[in-house]
Image: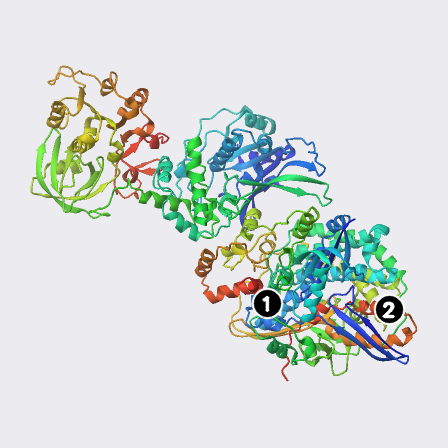
């Protein structure tokens, strides 16, 4: 008996994909994650545009990670053109990135993942039944949004970020208020940890290489080196050069691999590789969630995200203290450079490593752009995980099977709008 | 019965739906009046008929056109949500280039499943009843349009330019810093958020009904721009309007 | 009060009031609630928005309602007690305009609530390049504030403008109450870089004829239609009314928001018609609203010269430039040729010299090329080595190449002129200035009043009138002098008297004079005058003290301000409106005068009073 299981328009993920599984005589013939998000050709949109316009345009690659795209883009441009960024502005940029990771993680945890573990189709079902939980989700998200609004000027597609730093700075009083709000999230975070500690995460294991940035002494966010669970320790440019992006016939998203094969990026990779650099509070949460730093279970991506939420709240509070102690004025590059150049930069986006690389001509107009998205680096692993999980699920009715597979996909929090907005020009 | 609303997306970044989700407490209040029956990003449900469909993104493929037409068929009112749906937005930046060539350039392949057409705003495919411009949309404007629809009132967009909101908020003029700003010809409604952030207006909300282009171009020419430069300024978000 | 005392006063005010004052925000000065009294500033250029944003805010709730149809009860005076500390005189004038417009007829209670709950404290301003308050007389103010702080050296003199203001001092700075009253400060003379080249009273007249002027088309072409000018204007108050509902759709508020006549939808009606379809129409409307329509109602402009509109205009539309351009084009400006333009004189030959009194000589000059002028205009005459002096033209503007001037021997220059013989040449520049309005006088009865040498300009006028006698009604000449001896143009006077074309009456100060005329002041001649004031235009020319006596009598006769023309001669140096010597307050006599309708100078302290 053969059957074809198709999940059209996977829900509660960012972007559009179908999952197609062919099964024959109790065996999986094939399993394809078909990303059907339409390609947008961002590289072509950018070509010939002035460097000051690049970040605002690439931010539009993705609404969820617009800040990461802006950051990676600005840094790549700054590297290409040799522009220095004030250390204070770097702190502010980290704070903004922390805000985005909090926004994204909280959205994913509460709005996309929680329904799987409570057995409901959407969080809206909880509106009246579990008002406390819904309210808590909104409160936490509001504080995360506040960070992005205060520092970035807007929660989606930041407006204050600019080459060399920021075009507008928050008032001291606003930073103080934000700090207070962040401290105020702790009871809600405690309740969230309690909620997730009670979830029954499926048992599953598949070893994979976990890759993230490395920032000496700090939990990674914006950094210049890449490390992996297989012992890789390279510069961002070196690692990026080793990535091979390829396309498969069933997907509009590209996939990425290195000579060692497929690898994973994201919260789980960061927590695993940088566990000892987590804040004390996050370490506690890690214990409470019974998170084993050596885990090979992709379902633990949720735990890793929650651990990071606590970590980044704490880091954001420290960043604000730092900013309040060392007041600074307009942090914007004053002299704009002449001449072109090439540059690459990477940031830890909510879903993992994000690379941007540009080259500019003498007039500061973009010649080539290349962007490698976290989800592109995870897609092959997601497919491999599904294939390895399926044999245990084959006896389940279709609905349950679909639900389990979707839960797994959501554990990666794939961002498909991002992954189809390829920038890479590959001329071979 | 509560008004049944749904959110859908095509080619875009989903930032407009995210902006709706970011309405937080206001969203909570709105949810008392409406029933969200479809929202793929947050829900697994699907329904056969809706009162209002909010649709984000541009249309780039045959299957998208069909999906949009199906949504139109089961929706009483259809609202374009954000620049991509309203006028094509940033998706149209490369619209002057050949799609097949772009494909080869970006994917080094011309595989069938990658094939797309020049992105279209929704109104080129189906009848659009109302629109909420911006990249991303302004959450408050979304609420105002939804309110109007719930009261069966015509939603109205500001007919004046972003300059008004700048003046009201007493922001310094971008031109004072030698920045080229599209505020004088761009529809207000964003509370001049980019100017507040020290940036300039790139025109994401599209042009006002009667843009005063010739005096505006004179101002730009005084800043040293030639016609080509001026068109480039419009390009980012306003190809669809030319 | 010292600055420290003022800060203490401000701190005390903050206990009871919302204290609004200028703050620096993103490099701009904006009015806002002060959180620290130490930030109070007393000297600053105009703020971005005027205090309108507190008295007549952009978002103003008119009332609240329930969707089921109930108006919710709410205290009308929801306005918080507020003090605006830092009102410039122009902004205080603007509040008066808002008061005029919003209290007129049905009082706007929403505005009144805020107005009554707000105390206004004035301070002197620091004009910038866009201010032109000195042209509109709004650079100073005598009332309309509760308190006013005038800077004097390193302290401030407090002027109370209302009982509430006095009480504010008594309550919050009681130490000042014991102090002695001090004399008010002499008025500071400010000079704005931007200014009007003509008296504001000319505005309504200027605007009356400018409706079809091509300038509006040009403004319309330049204007971006952003409405910034009206939104920032301290006295523009056009608004829109909208219903805004709460998210639960059960309650709402009816709000008033600022609107702008510059928006393309402003005059659009439901059928789709737009009564001001082009931006030119809209700009013209704005200028008429500011400079004419309100004048017709309240005899003041709706503009206070704060310069906010031009400061923020991306298209660089500046009211002063627009109005000056209109004025320069206006028809009464008959200065088509200026042979001795600028500073270099042209040479004119002396044809004839006639002794017309013991001290006066009449010079008949042959000018190099003919020019047109109105009676009352003057020429600058040069004696190289001694300089230049202005002389009224005594002859008729008859288009010939001969001009007559009267020179009284007084100083070195005039003594030198008396030594000139016929056949010699003199340097002349001109003609300069505005004369008597011959065109306007047509069809009217005319009353000419000359005192002493004032007769020189009036002789020019009389000759002009007589050359076209049929165009005018009754002409009466009242002529006064110290003595018969000093009476100028005796022959002309007798000729006119005998001709019967003119009713001439004379007076001299000396008893038993050779003409046998009463020894009275010229003002006595007005006593038994039988004229029809409604048909009469008066042309008065004489020493300043004469105006002080004559003007009240003319008003008593019933003459209108704008029908009394005065000759306000001043020490004119350059004749080009630049040197400032001949300024009367904010205007230059050489450009706008020396002949003025009384209506345009009555507000100028320097014109007649002294």
Front in this rendered view, residue B215 or C57? B215
Say whether residue B48 is left or right of residue A28.
Answer: left
Decide if residue A112 is in sight here.
yes
Chain of residue at mark 2: A
Write down the residue under mark 2. Answer: A404
Write down the residue under mark 1. Answer: B92
Residue neighbourhood size for the residue with mark 1, other residues' Cα within 10 Å, grouped as few (<14), some (14–19), many (≥20):
many
SS under mark 1: helix
Q: Residue A392's x, y, as percent?
A: 91, 75
Front in this rendered view, residue C467 or C175? C467
Question: Relative to C341, does residue A246 appear above or below in the rendering?
Answer: below
Front in this rendered view, residue C445 or A285? C445
Are the residues under marks 1 and 2 on the same chain?
no
Chain of residue at mark 1: B
Question: Relative to A172, does residue B47 appear above or below in the rendering?
Answer: below
Decide if residue C139 is in sight here.
no
Residue neighbourhood size for the residue with mark 2, other residues' Cα within 10 Å, grouped as few (<14), some (14–19), many (≥20):
some
Q: Residue A359's x, y, as percent?
A: 58, 75
């Amino acid at each position: 008996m053969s059957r074809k299981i198709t999940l059209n328009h996977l829900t509660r993920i960012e972007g559009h994909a179908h999952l197609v599984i062919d099964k024959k005589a109790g065996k999986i013939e094939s399993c394809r994650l078909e990303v059907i998000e339409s390609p947008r050709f961002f590289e072509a949109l950018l070509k010939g545009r002035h460097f000051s316009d690049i970040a605002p345009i690439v931010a539009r690659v993705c609404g969820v990670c617009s800040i990461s795209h802006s950051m990676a883009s600005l840094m790549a441009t700054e590297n290409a053109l040799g522009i220095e960024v004030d250390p204070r502005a770097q702190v502010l940029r980290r704070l903004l990135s922390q805000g985005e990771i909090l926004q994204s993680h909280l959205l994913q945890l509460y709005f996309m993942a929680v329904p799987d573990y409570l057995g409901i189709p959407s969080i809206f079902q909880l509106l009246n039944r579990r008002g406390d939980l819904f309210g808590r989700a909104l409160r936490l998200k509001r504080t995360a949004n506040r960070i992005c609004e205060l520092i970035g000027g807007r929660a989606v597609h930041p407006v204050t970020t600019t080459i060399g730093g920021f075009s507008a700075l928050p008032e001291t009083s606003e930073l103080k208020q934000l700090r207070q709000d962040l401290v105020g999230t702790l009871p809600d975070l405690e309740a969230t940890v309690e909620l997730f500690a009670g979830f029954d995460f499926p048992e599953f294991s598949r070893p994979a290489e976990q890759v993230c940035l490395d920032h000496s002494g700090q939990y990674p966010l914006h950094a210049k080196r890449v490390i992996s669970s297989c012992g890789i320790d390279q510069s961002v440019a070196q690692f990026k050069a080793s990535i091979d992006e390829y396309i498969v016939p069933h997907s509009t998203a590209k996939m990425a691999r290195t000579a060692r094969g497929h690898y994973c990026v994201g919260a789980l990779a960061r927590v695993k590789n940088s566990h000892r650099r987590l804040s004390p509070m996050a370490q506690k949460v890690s214990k409470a969630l019974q998170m084993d730093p050596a885990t090979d279970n992709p379902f633990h991506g949720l735990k890793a995200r929650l651990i990071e939420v606590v970590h980044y709240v704490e880091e954001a509070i420290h960043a604000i203290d730092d900013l309040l102690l060392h007041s600074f004025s307009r942090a914007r590059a004053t002299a704009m450079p002449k001449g072109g150049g090439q540059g690459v930069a990477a940031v830890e986006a909510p879903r993992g490593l994000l690379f941007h690389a540009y080259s500019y001509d003498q007039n500061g107009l973009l010649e080539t752009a290349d962007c490698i998205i976290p989800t592109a680096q995870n897609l092959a692993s997601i497919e491999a995980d599904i294939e390895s999980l399926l044999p245990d699920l084959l006896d389940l009715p279709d609905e349950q099977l679909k639900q389990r597979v979707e839960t797994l996909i959501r554990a990666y929090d794939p961002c498909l709008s991002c992954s189809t907005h390829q920038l890479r020009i590959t001329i071979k | 019965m509560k008004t049944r609303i749904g959110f859908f997306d095509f080619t875009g970044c989903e930032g407009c739906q995210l902006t709706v989700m970011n309405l937080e407490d206001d969203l909570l209040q709105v949810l008392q009046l409406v029933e969200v029956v479809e929202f793929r990003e947050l829900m697994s449900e699907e329904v056969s008929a809706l009162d209002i469909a909010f649709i984000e993104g541009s249309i780039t493929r045959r299957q998208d056109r069909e999906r949009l037409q199906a949504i139109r068929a089961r929706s009483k009112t259809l609202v374009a949500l954000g620049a991509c749906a309203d006028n094509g937005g940033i998706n149209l930046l490369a619209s002057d280039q050949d799609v097949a060539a772009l494909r080869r350039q970006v994917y080094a392949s011309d595989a069938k499943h990658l094939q797309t057409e020049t992105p279209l705003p929704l109104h080129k495919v189906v009848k659009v009843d109302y629109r909420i411009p911006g990249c991303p949309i302004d959450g408050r404007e979304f609420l105002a349009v939804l309110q109007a629809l719930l009261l069966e009132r015509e939603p109205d967009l500001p007919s004046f330019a972003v300059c008004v909101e700048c003046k009201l908020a007493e922001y310094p003029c971008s031109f004072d810093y030698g920045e080229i700003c599209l505020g004088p010809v761009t529809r207000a409604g964003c509370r001049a958020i980019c100017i507040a952030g020290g940036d300039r207006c790139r025109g994401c909300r599209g042009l006002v009904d009667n843009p005063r282009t010739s005096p505006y171009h004179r101002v730009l020419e005084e800043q040293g721009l030639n016609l080509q430069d001026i068109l480039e300024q419009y390009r980012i978000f306003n190809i669809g309007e030319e | 009060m010292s600055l420290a005392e003022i800060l203490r006063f401000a701190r005390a005010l903050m206990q009871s009031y919302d204290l609004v004052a200028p703050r620096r925000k993103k490099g701009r000065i904006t009015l806002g609630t002060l959180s620290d009294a130490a930030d109070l500033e007393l000297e600053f250029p105009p703020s971005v928005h005027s205090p309108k944003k507190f008295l007549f805010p952009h978002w103003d709730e008119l009332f609240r309602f329930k969707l089921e149809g109930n108006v919710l009860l709410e205290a009308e005076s929801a306005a918080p007690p507020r003090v605006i500390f830092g009102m410039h005189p122009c902004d205080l004038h603007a509040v008066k305009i808002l008061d005029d417009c919003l209290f007129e007829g049905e009082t706007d209670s929403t505005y009144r609530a805020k107005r009554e709950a707000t105390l206004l404290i004035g301070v002197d301003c620091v004009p910038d390049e866009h201010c032109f308050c000195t042209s509109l007389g709004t650079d100073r103010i005598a009332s309309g504030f509760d308190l006013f702080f005038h800077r004097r050296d390193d302290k401030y003199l407090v002027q109370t403008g209302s009982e509430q203001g006095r009480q504010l001092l008594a309550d919050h700075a009681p130490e000042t109450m014991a102090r002695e009253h001090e004399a008010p400060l002499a008025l500071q003379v400010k000079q704005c870089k931007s200014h009007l080249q003509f008296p504001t009273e000319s505005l309504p007249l200027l605007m009356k004829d400018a409706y079809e002027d091509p300038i509006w088309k040009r403004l319309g072409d330049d204007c971006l239609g952003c409405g910034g000018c009206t939104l920032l204007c301290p006295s523009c108050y056009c608004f829109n009314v909208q219903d805004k509902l709460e998210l639960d759709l059960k309650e709402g508020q009816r709000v008033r928001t600022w609107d702008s006549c510059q928006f393309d939808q402003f005059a659009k009606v439901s059928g789709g018609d737009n009564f001001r379809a082009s931006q030119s129409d809209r700009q013209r409307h704005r200028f008429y609203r500011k400079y004419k329509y309100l004048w017709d109602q309240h005899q003041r402009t709706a503009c206070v010269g704060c310069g906010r509109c031009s400061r923020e205009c991306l298209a660089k539309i500046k009211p002063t430039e627009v109005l000056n351009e209109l004025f320069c084009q206006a028809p009464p400006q008959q200065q088509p040729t200026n042979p001795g333009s600028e500073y270099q004189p042209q040479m004119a030959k002396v044809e004839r010299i006639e002794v017309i009194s013991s001290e006066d000589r009449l010079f008949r000059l042959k000018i190099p090329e003919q020019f047109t002028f109105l009676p009352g205009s003057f020429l600058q005459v040069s004696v190289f080595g001694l300089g230049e002096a202005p002389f009224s033209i005594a002859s008729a503007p008859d288009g010939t190449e001969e001009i007559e001037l009267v020179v009284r021997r007084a100083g070195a220059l005039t003594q030198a002129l008396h030594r000139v013989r016929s056949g010699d040449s003199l340097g002349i520049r001109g003609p300069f200035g505005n004369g008597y309005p011959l065109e306007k006088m047509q069809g009217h009865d005319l009353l000419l009043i000359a005192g002493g040498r004032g007769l020189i300009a009036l002789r020019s006028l009389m000759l002009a009138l007589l050359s076209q006698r049929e165009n005018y009604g009754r002409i009466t000449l009242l002529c006064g002098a110290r003595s018969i001896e000093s009476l100028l143009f005796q022959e002309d006077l007798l000729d006119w008297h005998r001709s019967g074309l003119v009713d001439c009456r004379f007076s001299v100060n000396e008893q038993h004079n050779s003409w046998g005329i009463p020894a009275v002041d010229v003002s006595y001649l007005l006593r038994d005058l039988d004229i029809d004031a409604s048909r009469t235009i008066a042309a008065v020319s004489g020493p300043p003290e004469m105006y002080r006596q004559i003007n009240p009598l003319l008003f008593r006769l019933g003459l209108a301000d704008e029908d009394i023309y005065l000759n306000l001669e001043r020490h004119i140096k350059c004749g080009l409106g630049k040197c400032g010597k001949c300024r009367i307050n904010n205007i230059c006599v050489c450009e706008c005068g020396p002949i003025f309708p009384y209506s345009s100078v009555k507000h100028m302290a320097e014109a007649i009073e002294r």
